Amino acid sequence: MRIYVGFKVFDTLIDPAAINRARAVFGEKMQVIGPKLQDSGVFAGKREGFMLLDVASQDEAFALFAELADFCEIEIHLVSSFEVLASTSPSIRCRPPRIPSPVRRHGNMPCPLVRGSGIDTELAPTSCNHSQG
């Protein structure tokens, strides 16, 4: 069972001794979590991060993260693929439909003088009346 685990260290965790204790507990837990880890990361400039894990059960997930709740907020969600989502309902597409470009065409090339072609000004026309030369 794949799970997403988001974590955010408590803002009140500022005492150096408490930070060292939290790091020690987190380090010990990472020895157990490590083999189950599929992906992870931390957010630059924040005391937050995420993990993507493969666990056997919700009880195992609880056992892995219960101790860390003393130091941070933990958010856990089950993760399924878009393929699984699509298989549950035929009306759900696995890939989003291709959205046509709003760029006006001048032959096979976008016309740079038309609104919506990248040069979006109020003075630009909404259609191209240039002759193809």
Image (cartoon, rainbow, N blue to C red):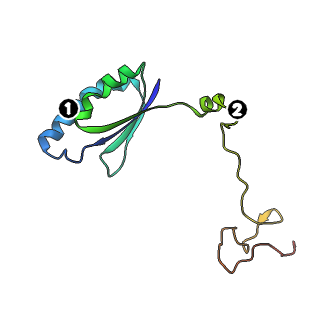
User: Secondary structure under badge 1?
Assistant: helix
Q: Closer to us: mark 2 or mark 1? A: 2
Q: Amino acid at mark 1?
A: Ala
**Foreground residue, 4 or 117?**
4
Name the side, left or right, on which 37 lies relative to 11.
Answer: right
Instruction: Tell which circle, 2 or 1, labels the residue nearer the N-terminal end.
Output: 1
User: Which residue is under mark 1?
Assistant: 24
Residue 102 in which image quadrant: bottom right
Q: x%, y% of residue 86?
A: 64, 32
Q: Residues within 10 Å of mark 1 (few under 14, many from 20)?
A: few
Q: Is residue 129 above or below residue 70?
A: below
Name the side, left or right, on which 86 lies relative to 2.
Answer: right
Q: Residues within 10 Å of mark 2 (few under 14, many from 20)?
A: few
Q: Is residue 2 above or below residue 56?
A: below
Q: Amino acid at mark 2?
A: Pro
If the image is split into quadrants, where does the C terminus sit? bottom right
Residue depicted at 70% across the width and 32% down the height: 90
Residue 3 in which image quadrant: top left
Residue 115 in which image quadrant: bottom right
Q: x%, y% of residue 14?
A: 17, 47
User: Secondary structure under badge 2?
Assistant: loop
Q: Which mark is residue 90?
A: 2
Residue depicted at 65% across the width and 36% down the height: 94
Residue depicted at 66% across the width and 78% down the height: 122
Name the side, left or right, on which 111 lies relative to 10.
Answer: right
Residue depicted at 29% across the width and 46% down the height: 47
Q: x%, y% of residue 29?
A: 27, 27
